[in-house]
Image: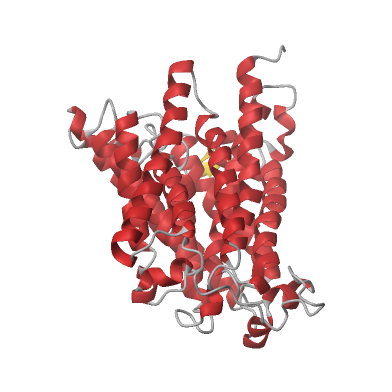
Amino acid sequence: MELQPVHVWMMVCAALVLLMTPALAFFYGGMTRAKSVLNMMMMSFVALGITAVVWVLWGNSMAGGGSSVGGLFGHPFEQFGLAGLIGTEDLIAAGFAGTFAIITVALISGAIADRARFGAWCLFVPVWVTVVYAPVAYWVWGGGLLSAEGAIGSWAGEAIDYAGGTVVHINAGVAGLVLALILGQRKGFGRDPGQRPHSIPFVMLGAALLWFGWFGFNGGAASDPAEAGLIWINTMVAPGAALVAWCVTERLRDGKPTSLGAASGVVAGLVAITPACADVTPLGAVGLGLVAGVASALAVGLKYRFGYDDSLDVVGVHLVSGLIGTLALGFIARDTGLFYGGGLEQLGAQTVAAVVSMAYTGLATLAIGLAIHRTIGFRISESDEQTGIDLAEHAETGYEYGGLGTSAGSFVPHPATSGHLELSK
């Protein structure tokens, strides 16, 4: 079998998507306290390692490679170890799909920063990928419940989710919210200035690398040059518009735009365009980015109002902008959206897909999280949280100041580095 350009393109895109998880480690790591940065980055790295193994053993088969088990998931052992794919081009597609599973579960970690036991997280990752991610991916992309031939999609219509608005971002956002509620608030939540981001340069570096990798995330499955070009332009302009919208929102509300807001706006726009990248015009992408930027900038402050400690705004950015991008397709999808004469069918399909996924992910994550929390324990002790999770869970510190490290939590960011804590005002 001769290697074709499309195969090379998908492998390059898979590498770009794989880079997004270390990029997320920088993005999340910069947003945590100095005494938590290593643990936060390790949660992304270990998610990469564990999920890669799970994907090869049974994850890919469950997400669409195996024969259907009641329309719920693929047979987990039909392609166990990917042995049946060796010598075929399907092995490339399996690798590309695996990088999506990796980044999805890594996204969840931001909701429970500073307080989750590392061992508990290492157990949560393979269970969640198996029980939640793989079935939802199968429903949407593998011919399962939410696809055109599926039990739900056949009557509700087929939802559009080109690169993962439902499968990745809504999925991760709901899971993050559930885990944040199970683990509870950090000590000093909403009051302790030490919970502000410790390294805005890390955050901006992570956001830049995420944006770079996202061109592979959205473009890897492009079927022809025209579609690829549209995806590329939309992936450039939607986050750009969201960045502007977030900064303007901060300027009007708080008096000053922030670097953290600019980086977060980029991610919000990327999240929103993910399901819609191949199905909206560039003008539609601009509008989608503007809405997502404003909505997520406002939504990140809701955690203070409602009291859930979503440490790094997984809910405010990924769930909110994921829902916006998914539901917006009912209005602005070029061929089937309401604004293009398509009626209400597409909006109905998008709504059903979002609701079904949220309900299943919420209940399944609740069961997994509570089982871990009530057996081995999911949260570190209060004393370990005060000392610093890096030292407690890894016997390391990210920084050394005069040989003292940060174990005592003495390093506090400058008050001007307000981060999302100030967004609650």
Q: How far across and down, in percent of the image, does residue 139 sit?
A: 45, 41
Q: Nearer the viewer, residue 68 or 33?
A: 33
Q: Is residue 417 left or right of residue 386?
A: left
Q: Is residue 181 above or below residue 282?
A: below
Image quarter in which the N terminus is found: top right
**Number of numbered discs present?**
0
Q: Is residue 4 left or right of residue 397?
A: left
Image quarter in which the C terminus is found: bottom left
Q: Is residue 96 above or below residue 24?
A: above
Q: Residue 399 lies in what quarter of the image?
A: bottom right
Q: How far across and down, in percent of the image, does residue 84 sit?
A: 71, 29
Q: Nearer the viewer, residue 25 or 369?
A: 25
Task: Identify the image's colour scheme: rainbow, by chain, secondary structure or one colour.
Answer: secondary structure
Question: At x 63% / y 78%, what residue is drawn?
Answer: 377
Q: How far across and down, in percent of the image, does residue 226 sit?
A: 43, 17
The answer to whether one can see residue 38 in this image is yes
Q: How far across and down, in percent of the image, does residue 352 sit?
A: 31, 47
Q: Residue furthest bottom?
A: 383
Q: Is residue 237 above or below residue 267?
A: above
Question: At x 68% / y 48%, what residue is drawn?
Answer: 54
Question: At x 60% / y 62%, what residue is drawn?
Answer: 30
Question: At x 66% / y 22%, what residue is drawn?
Answer: 8
Q: Is residue 367 left or right of residue 161?
A: right
Q: Nearer the viewer, residue 315 or 366?
A: 315
The answer to whether one can see residue 342 in this image is no
Q: Residue furthest right?
A: 403
